[in-house]
Amino acid sequence: MIILMHAKVGPKVRLMLNQFLRCAFLAMALGPVSAYVTAAPIDVKNSTVKATFSQFNVPVTGDFKQFSGDIQFDPAKPDATKAQLSVLTSSYDLGDALYNKEVAGKDWFDSKNHPNGVFKLSSVKPAAGGGSGAFTATGELTLRGKTKALQFPVKLTSGPKSHVFSGDVTIKRLEFGIGQGDWADTALVADNVKIEFKMSLPK
């Protein structure tokens, strides 16, 4: 049918027809590939973000209760993964209202002026000797208006309903200006802060 039409129509119509066919074939070629790409918000209910610091050498862990993000993930090309996570710094919960108010204040997160901490993932690469699902992630973390590059291990676990990305990274709080005044003394609060995460992405 297409051959007969091509023989009867003029050059302009033939050009339009050829363009249409090229687009159609391209869509068919890309269709099976794009069907496997997941680009969606994370499942917050099944995800966690924790931060642990040491005060007088005693570990203290709190949870960020409010956060959001999205992940672009293709199981066939995990090294092309892109993601962004935003946490509400005032939602950091130490289990006590007075402590929570203190860490949201100007000496710590300064949540009034810097309400969100943001991590942007730029790349993931298979980790050497890490086995299946082991990757090294690279990205940038922004806290209190300061941005630092990070690199850390990530474990990918795929289940019947979701992909789960988990791992941890240790940052230096003073590089971000977190803990000022008397709290800048690392004898009181250690400089190292361990951030642990589990991000669930529905399939």
Image (tube, rainbow, N blue to C red):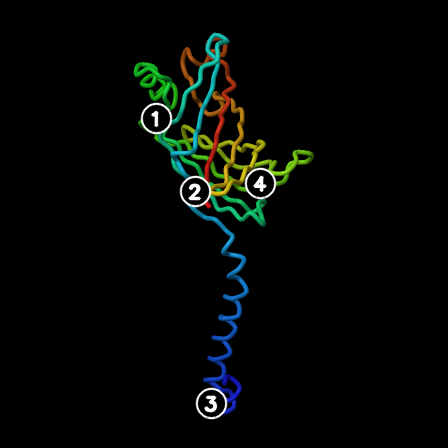
Instruction: Name the foreground residue: 151 vs 41.
Output: 41
- Measuring from the top left, give residue 77's x and y in whole percent: 58, 49
Point out the residue furthest to the front here.
Answer: 160
- Measuring from the top left, give residue 49's x and y in whole percent: 44, 28
Q: Residues within 10 Å of mark 3 (few under 14, many from 20)?
A: few
Instruction: In the rendered view, tell whether residue 119 sits above or below residue 101.
Output: below
**C-beta proximity under 8 Å, tags 1 and 3:** no
Instruction: Name the foreground residue: 96 vs 191.
Output: 96
Left or right, 147 with respect to 75, comes to left
Say what amino acid the circle numbered 3 marks: Val
Q: Which residue is mark 4?
A: 124
Circle 3 SS class: loop
Circle 4 SS class: strand
Query: How much space separates mark 1 and mark 3, taking CA atoms?
Result: 67 Å
The tag earlier along the polypeptide, 1 or 4, is 1
The tag earlier along the polypeptide, 1 or 3, is 3
Query: How much space separates mark 2 and mark 4, taking CA atoms?
Result: 15 Å
Residue 9, labelled with which disc?
A: 3
